[in-house]
Amino acid sequence: MPKITIVLADDHHIVRGGVSALLKAEPDMQVVGESGDGLDTLRLVEELKPRVLVTDIEIPGISGIEVTRRVTARFPETRVVVLSMYQNEAFVQSALKAGAMAYVLKDSGPEELKTAIRTAHNGGHYLSPVLSELAFRYYAAGSKNTKETAYDSLTEREREVLHLLVQGYNNAQVAARLVISRRTAESHRANLMRKLGAANQADLMRIAMQIDELQPMLKAKKPGVSAGGPTDL
């Protein structure tokens, strides 16, 4: 029987290494790729076409939820399992709405993750036991606030730019990270700020704090990345 091919996405090397070792010990599973960055994860999935993607929510580049949204849209044959420390229902709701088939808490036992992967691979849904099936239906049908609705109106590129901005990247750094011109980065920034109703950088950050999906990105600032200033707008 063909093995379940898996890509792992988590920016904590120790965690990723531990999960990788755990899954490699399973006779029906094969870890074919690993990543610590959201944008790199998308490239890996496109290249390797794994049967399952196991991703954290709080990863740099773009969030695990945005990765989930794109993978399920572009590569429906790849099932997504979210492995997260966040038990907050807003994150669970966002992940499920993005298309995740399973949501496992990091403090769960190893067997839970294995079960979640096998269940998702077979087309089923799985939640850690503390998240009931009733909660699953509630999360999947939950409503969004107006800022989240505005966020949904952003293009994929605008979301990429926004995710980098809230991590502290300025226009030049965004352009370099996404391999686009600074003028293009500035244009995307202007468009997303208009759609979100942000007048300036401080306003943009306040709005970002109201969007559940962006909460992990606000914590994902990397060393050496400037927060940007008025001259970056």
Image (tube, rainbow, N blue to C red):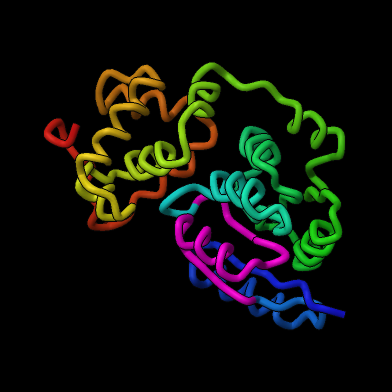
User: Is residue 218 something one can see in this rendering?
Assistant: no
On the picture, is 119 further left or further right than 88?
right
On the picture, is 164 further left or further right than 176?
right
On the picture, is 97 further left or further right than 157?
right
Residue 85, above or below 215:
below
Quarter of the image containing the C terminus? top left
Q: Nearer the viewer, residue 10 or 50?
A: 50
The image quadrant that residue 170 belongs to is top left
Could you tell me residue 220's position as x and y percent? Answer: 40, 49
Q: Nearer the viewer, residue 129 or 229?
A: 229
Q: Residue at x 70, y 47 (%)?
A: 100
Q: Residue at x 70, y 63 (%)?
A: 52
Q: Residue at x 27, y 46 (%)?
A: 169
User: Is residue 161 something one can see in this rendering?
Assistant: yes
Quarter of the image containing the N terminus? bottom right
Q: Residue at x 81, y 83 (%)?
A: 27
Q: Nearer the viewer, residue 226 or 38?
A: 38
Could you tell me residue 165's position as x and y percent? Answer: 32, 40
- Reply yes or no: does residue 76 show up in magenta: no
Residue 187, above or below 144:
below
Q: Residue furthest left?
A: 231
Residue 21, above or below 96:
below
Residue 55, above or below 182:
below
Could you tell me residue 115's position as x and y percent? Answer: 83, 63
Magenta range: 32-58
Could you tell me residue 182's position as x and y percent? Answer: 20, 44
